[in-house]
Image: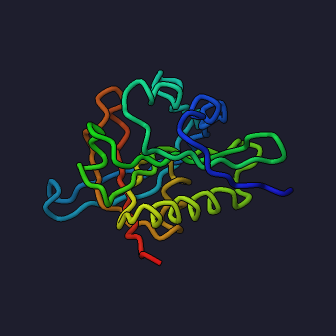
Amino acid sequence: MTIEIVEESADRLAEYGEVSISFLVQSTLRLQPLSNGLGGLILSEEEVDPPYLKDYDAYGEGPATWADKWDVSHWATIAAFDGRRRVGGSVLAWKTPGKWMLEDRDDLVVLQDMRIDPEYRRRGIGSRLFTRAVEWAQQKECHQMKVETQNINVPACRFYAAQGCELGVINRHAYSDFPEEVQLLWYLDIRQP
């Protein structure tokens, strides 16, 4: 298997979104506040019974809609191809007014999305995409990358930690439609070459 990683402009978001982002939730990171949070927080992994399929795109806010919400002219799509087949990618958001995750900072990039075709997961493609994302951020002279995930996506949490990201924000009340889900924001400090 020879996977080619290429940078594309954000006008390819609809095609990018054709790769499935769905995953099987088999465990969750349960958040337990100690002394109402004053004693700290504990994240402990628990099995989910029965497991269920989560598909972020199913809620009508997938990649094909992003250009309608934000100015994506400073965004990048990094795609993974097996021959002519798109098998994954990542989307980077940068310098986008109104995108709260960017905090009005030009030195911050948000890893807006990363997805790998289910048939191609656990083959190192995600690590290659992440490395390319960091390189892109370095070229833009960004000093930090931010990534959002949830406590129900334990494999993604492990992945970002393995890439050197540090958990910086835990928001128990981020998703009113999904009160059992906890927002986790990961940060990576980017060294300039």
Q: Residue at x 39, y 66 (%)?
A: 141
Q: Residue at x 81, y 48 (%)?
A: 82
Q: How many marks?
A: 0
Write down the quadrant of residue 165 in the picture. bottom left
Q: Is residue 58 left or right of residue 6?
A: left
In depth, the one of 7 and 117 nearer the eye is 7
The colouring scheme, among rainbow, by chain, secondary structure or one colour, is rainbow
Which residue, as the protein is rendered here, is positioned at the far top? Answer: 60
- Whole-percent x, y for residue 138 in the image: 45, 67
Q: Position of residue 18 (x, y in %)?
A: 65, 30
Q: Is residue 32 left or right of residue 27?
A: left
Quadrant assignment, res 145: bottom left
| Residue lying at the far bottom of the rendered structure | 193
**Residue 164 vs residue 179, the one in the foreground:** 164
In this picture, residue 128 sits left or right of residue 104: right
Does residue 21 lie above or below 186 as drawn?
Answer: above
Quadrant in which the N terminus appears: bottom right
Residue 136 position in % (x across, y down): 51, 60
Lateral position of residue 174 relative to residue 59, left or right: left
Q: In percent of the image, x 48 and y 56: which residue is there?
A: 157
- Quadrant of the image occupied by residue 9: top right
Q: Position of residue 170 (x, y in %)?
A: 29, 53
